[in-house]
Image (cartoon, helix red, strand yellow):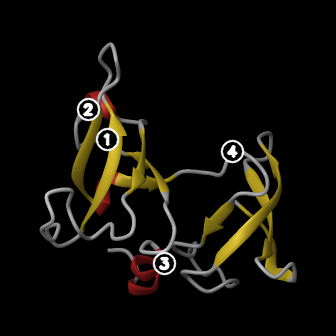
């Protein structure tokens, strides 16, 4: 389950996730973006089922039609930022890890595809507790 602070921040920011195996196998590894202003409300206007997020993705067919889906959180994996000056959010801590609080939104200042990590700062420019995130 996503932390309540993360869910509140998802009402302010779009988030990108990667689809994990088990939801629809043909979409494994496909990225999705949360609906705003409320990823807890489906495209039809009703509330999404518990432990689901309303997301937008495209089909694999010619023309790539846009789909609005409610996907269980357990099938949504973090998707690493791919360019600097984008925002990222701490959605969980590693085992025994300390650092920025869950839900904190940070700005990506640099990234390393070789080391699979990003360098981050607070939105006001101050240093983050952890200068890099995996």
Residue 9: which numbered mark, if any?
3
Counting from the top left corner in percent of width and height, residue 103 is at: 54, 80
User: Does 120 sit left or right of 9 as displayed?
Assistant: right
User: Does 30 sit left or right of 110 as displayed?
Assistant: left
- Mark in the foreground, 3 or 1: 3
Q: Going 86% across and 78% down the picture, which residue do you hit?
A: 125
Pointer 4 residue:
82
Residue 21: which numbered mark, if any?
1
Q: Going 24% across and 54% down the picture, which residue do you hit?
A: 71
Nearer the observer, 87 or 25: 87
Pointer 2 residue:
25
Label 3 with label 2: CB-CB less than 8 Å: no
Q: CA distance from mark 3 to mark 1?
A: 26 Å
From what the image shows, is residue 133 above or below residue 82? below
Q: Going 81% across and 50% down the picture, which residue do you hit?
A: 111
Q: Going 52% across and 74% down the picture, which residue do you hit?
A: 92
Query: Which comes sooner in the sequence, label 3 or label 2?
Result: 3
Density class for disc 4 (Cα within 10 Å; few <14, some 14-19, many ≥20) is: few
Label 1 with label 2: CB-CB less than 8 Å: yes
Nearer the observer, 44 or 53: 44
Counting from the top left corner in percent of width and height, residue 15 is at: 49, 60
Q: CA distance from mark 1 to mark 2?
A: 6 Å
Query: Which comes sooner in the sequence, label 4 or label 3?
Result: 3
Nearer the observer, 112 or 10: 10
From what the image shows, is residue 38 above or below residue 27? below
User: Based on the displayed image, in which of its 4 quarters is residue 39 positioned?
Assistant: bottom left
Label 4 with label 3: CB-CB less than 8 Å: no
Residue 50: which numbered mark, if any?
none
Q: Quadrant of the N terminus?
A: bottom left
User: Based on the displayed image, in which of its 4 quarters is residue 52 positioned?
Assistant: bottom left
Query: Which comes sooner in the sequence, label 4 or label 2?
Result: 2
Q: CA distance from mark 4 to mark 3?
A: 20 Å
């Amino acid at each position: 389950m996503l932390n309540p602070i993360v869910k509140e921040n998802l009402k302010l920011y779009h988030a990108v996730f990667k689809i994990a195996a088990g939801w629809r196998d043909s979409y494994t590894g496909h990225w999705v973006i949360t609906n705003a202003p409320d990823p807890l409300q489906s495209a039809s206007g009703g509330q999404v089922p518990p432990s689901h997020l309303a997301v937008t993705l495209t089909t694999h067919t010619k023309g790539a039609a846009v789909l609005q889906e409610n996907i269980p959180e357990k099938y949504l994996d973090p998707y690493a930022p791919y360019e600097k000056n984008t925002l990222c959010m701490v959605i969980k801590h590693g085992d025994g890890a300390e650092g920025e609080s869950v839900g904190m939104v940070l700005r990506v200042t640099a990234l390393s595809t070789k080391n699979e990590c990003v360098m981050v700062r607070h939105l006001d420019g101050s240093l983050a507790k952890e200068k890099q995130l995996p």
